[in-house]
Image (cartoon, rainbow, N blue to C red):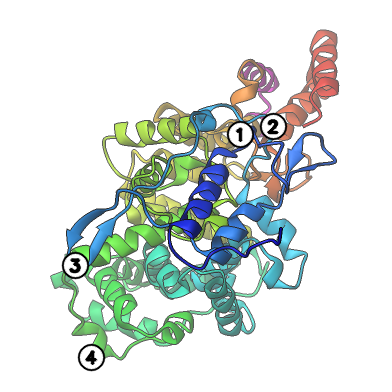
Amino acid sequence: MTKAELPNEGPEREIFLRALRRFSDSCQPPNLIADCPFSIDVPEGGRGCGEECIDLLEVYGSPLAEDSVEFGAGMSVAPMRSPGAHSGEAVAGVRLFDAAEIYLRDRENSNIEEWHITSLIMQLREQFIPSPEATLLVEREDRCLALCREIARRGLSPEGIVRYGFRDSFVYNMALAVTMPAIMSLDESQEGERSQLPVSPPGWGDLVDALAADASTLGLSYPSDESPRRLARFRMSVALTNEFIQRMQAWLNSASLVSLLGWHAPSIGEFLGAETSRAAPEDRGTRDVQRWIVDRYTNTYLSDWGLKSLQLEWLYKKGQREAPCSRKQMAERYIRDLDLAYALSDVSCKRDPADETSVALNSMATELVLAGRVASAAELLEMAVRKDPHNPSLLNSLGFCLVPQDPKRALVDLERAYELGFTATMNLCNRLYALLRLGKYASVLELADRAVAEWGELDQGRLILWDFMASSPVVKRSACPRCYVRDIALYVANNYGDDASRRRWRDFAKGHKA
């Protein structure tokens, strides 16, 4: 009997594709189907595969939707079949998603065609979003174009990601990139010349000045004291007004992709005359989907996702909306139903959404810290905290910046951040370092002891922390938080503790290598 090819059309073809899709949907980690012909033994133990079923569905086409609902005008929505009930259970043996780790691994490979979609989007964001480092990058625009071509080859919309997914980060960071170099130059005398000063993107400063010419309409007053620092702060305040931000958003809506990637400033006439009306519903829908893509592949922790992204992920998981990209791309990240439900519950219970200006200021402060300009970052955060005094994330970041020079005040801000709900391991590490700088060794061990009681809840993703072993303050760009807690406690116990505390932390360190 001769073997027949897969039928080209009709129910004879559809039955095979539907069976394959159901087979693929039911094969979820950790319960991979052992009798799949593509299933293999993996060196770490258990079964694995190359997700060939997803490749086959892409080659032959997904089956026709079952029970699609017509809405007229050629529009219909087809519910997707939800994965098996086990998808909400703990996934033993499945590697946790860590966007930063994936990006670090991929960067060692010069061929971006072999990168994960996570790394492509992260590097595009790194190159496109204005920052002290990005303004100094050589051939930045060409690199952005190469990344966009590869993202398009994977079936995603690079223009959508740039125009909508990075929208808020771009407009606020551009406002700061235009005005922050002046403040940073004033801080040179405090910090010394640690790195080359960033440059303001050409043309954008003229737009700030044009808007500042009529400061009263912005609710601002021109400074009576025209000192360089006051003038620099005034220009930053202008760049962060709704009037400037809304015109930036209008430019994002209309500029070409090449102009966006090149940061090509519009003329003053175009900028001041820009239409700043609210986005149409269809534009908001597109923007939400692109933000979902960016959140899904670049934010390791669900707590860092936007509410709309979490909602869209939930609808996708429950088969109530299509994926924003191919099934193969979606398979790069596995998200447990239970984790998603917790994140949704947590975000929904927050009374106020995160202030976008505060988020942007915090992000820029992080970039300044990484560029070695901690004094400039602290000044930026001081301004942010004055405007948003109950923001725990801002207080934690300000405390971080103040620890080397003023650990007593830093500890006040860090403890206030914790009281307001910033309970991430980053805050714990910052408080431990502040206590160490203050010489409160018993308090270091007491706080570390409390952390051990909740060891399983401590974050595992890499963090930006101070190197407590360095003779002068040095930032560690990718520190293991659990290792940090263990090592700082061991250091204090060995050097300042009694015999009992030394034995305790030496034993703990032996049993907790990471």
Are the residues flagged by discs 3 and 4 in contact, CB closer than 8 Å?
no
Question: Which image quadrant for residue 452?
Answer: top right
Residue 132 in view, yes or no: no
Q: Which residue is mark 2?
A: 482
Mark closest to the chain's N terminus, 2 or 1: 1
Q: Nearer the viewer, residue 370 or 185?
A: 370
Mark closest to the chain's N terminus, 4 or 1: 4
Q: Which residue is mark 1?
A: 459
| Quarter of the image that includes the N terminus | bottom right
Percent across and percent down for residue 23 are: 56, 43
Q: Indicate left or right for 309 with 6 as reference.
A: left
User: For the residue carrying disc 4, how many other residues have a C-alpha within 10 Å: few (<14), some (14-19), or many (20+)?
Assistant: few
CA separation, marks 2 and 3? 46 Å
Look at 63% across and 15% down and name the residue there: 453
Whether residue 445 appears in magenta in the rendering, the answer is: yes
Are the residues flagged by discs 2 and 1 in contact, CB closer than 8 Å?
yes
Mark closest to the chain's N terminus, 2 or 4: 4
Q: Which amino acid lies under the numbered mark 3 shown in the image of this protein?
A: Ala
